[in-house]
Image (spheres, rainbow, N blue to C red):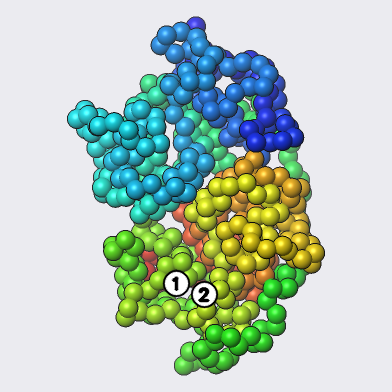
Amino acid sequence: MNDLVFVDNVSLFLPGDPAHEWALRHISWHIGRGEHCALMGANGAGKSTLLRLLRGELWPAQGRVVWNGPDGPEEAPLAGRAMSALVSPGQQEQYQRHAWYITGRELLLTGFEDTPLLYSYSQTQREQLVADMARRLDALPLLDRLVPEVSQGQLRLLLLGRALVRRPALLLLDECTDGLDDDHRQRFLALLDEVREDSTIIMSTHRPDQLPAWCRRIRWVDAGCLMPPDWQPPHDDDDDGDADTPPSPLPRCARGPAGNKTSGKTGGETGGKTDDGADVLLDVRHATVFIDRKEVLHDICWQLRRGEHWRITGANGSGKSTFLRMLAGDEFVADGGSISRFLPGQGGKTVVLSDIRKAVRLVSDLSQALYGYNLSALELVCSGWDNTVGNYRDYSAAELEEARAVMRRLDCLSLAETSIRLLSTGQLRRLFLARALLGGPDILLLDEPCSGLDEHGRHQYLALLDRLATQGIHFVFVSHLASDGPSCLNRTAHMEDGRLRIVS
């Protein structure tokens, strides 16, 4: 039998869904050995759920899945686990959330036994395979680094190496290259070109232009259904959505008029002026940041002035995410450096962390990973009023209405009562932007915000950022793809080895 996996009329709902709504419906699919395929579809269509089914992490409520391993056909989900490896945003979030103190070497070694942590002594042969894999991915320096210390892109690279190290019969990749810089993305794709001789590769993507030449078989997933091979999505003539709609005002309930607040301020309106009279919202002077006693950022001098929107470029591990966390107040500047913040929405110059967290909002994979418990989408968005991880008070009717209004603008109001544990990565991306907008922030720090968004979602997301720029919000934007970025970006800086260089 040439079938590697046979999916026979499978329907399923996700664990924890009290409504038992079908996440996949009547899926039938013969996956032949060597028949590499790309899965495409809108956010929430069911691509990630289908990959988890093929992996054996989910099991059917109706129908069956048959895996043809070395011992013949089996229907037990453990057979799927034994013959496959999955790399997904959810897997990455697990390591970010738990922050296990294991090294990159230990993480790659767990791939042989397919366990989250290492439970046995390593073997010399496996150590050699791990070192060779790291060398080929240009990740040798990561082998002795602790996982909580590596960047988001570096963690994704390690997880890809973990999946490849034992060359599974079935390799399942869910938006696998998101967050990788161009060099590491090309290295990984070159390695996939070799692995495909031994592994059947099924990869989900929202970016068909990044598919390797040998993976041109495409199957579409739509509303939980696997569409026929010749099916194409209907063309959306109104792709601009509401791009021409006049922008509605941002919520202001939690801010109050600029300049009315005085508690904790270290200066008045003139505190945000430089000698030449230009307004400065963030002023970073000789900032050095240590994480676990390691110097990550080195002597950075940088300013964000009114009307500026910055793109920060740089390779994986160069320090971009740490830089954003420093601006947000989540990392502290070492003695000898300083960062001053002049935040109009909080009344001017301030050093009070609670004020900074309301006015400077960070949207990143890491902030998303911290939400590992059960909240509704509306509850998640409402946590943005106080910029807390979770909800610690009841919200007023006005605050709830403002939250719904922001969700409506981001086309995610229909998710309001849905548990965030049942949502796709792309759906969560929109919700975390909605969360960041509550209270009318002065500055948004966006770290690879388009990862996991489908094409239409990216267009809407970036168009909204441009409209928000006209309302006075300033952006610091990190992305490895030049095509991902609002048109309002007008300044560029490059990060390399923890040092920031102004480009334009």
Q: Residue 33's spot in the image, x, y percent? A: 47, 16
- Gap in angstroms between the C-alphas marked 2 and 1: 31 Å
In this rendering, the answer to whether 338 lies above or below 447 is below
Rendered location of residue 89, percent (x, y): 51, 42
Name the residue carrying label 2. Answer: 353
Which of these two is toward me, 7 or 256? 256
Quarter of the image with the C terminus in it = bottom left
Foreground residue, 133 or 240?
133
Residue indicated by mark 1 = 504
The residue at the far front in this view is: 393
Q: Residue at x 46, y 36 (%)?
A: 87
Q: Residue 313: in sight, yes or no?
A: no
Three-letter amino acid code at the position of disc 1: Ser
Residue depicted at 64% across the width and 32% down the height: 14
Which amino acid type is shown beneath numbered disc 2? Leu
Residue 109 visible in the current orientation: yes
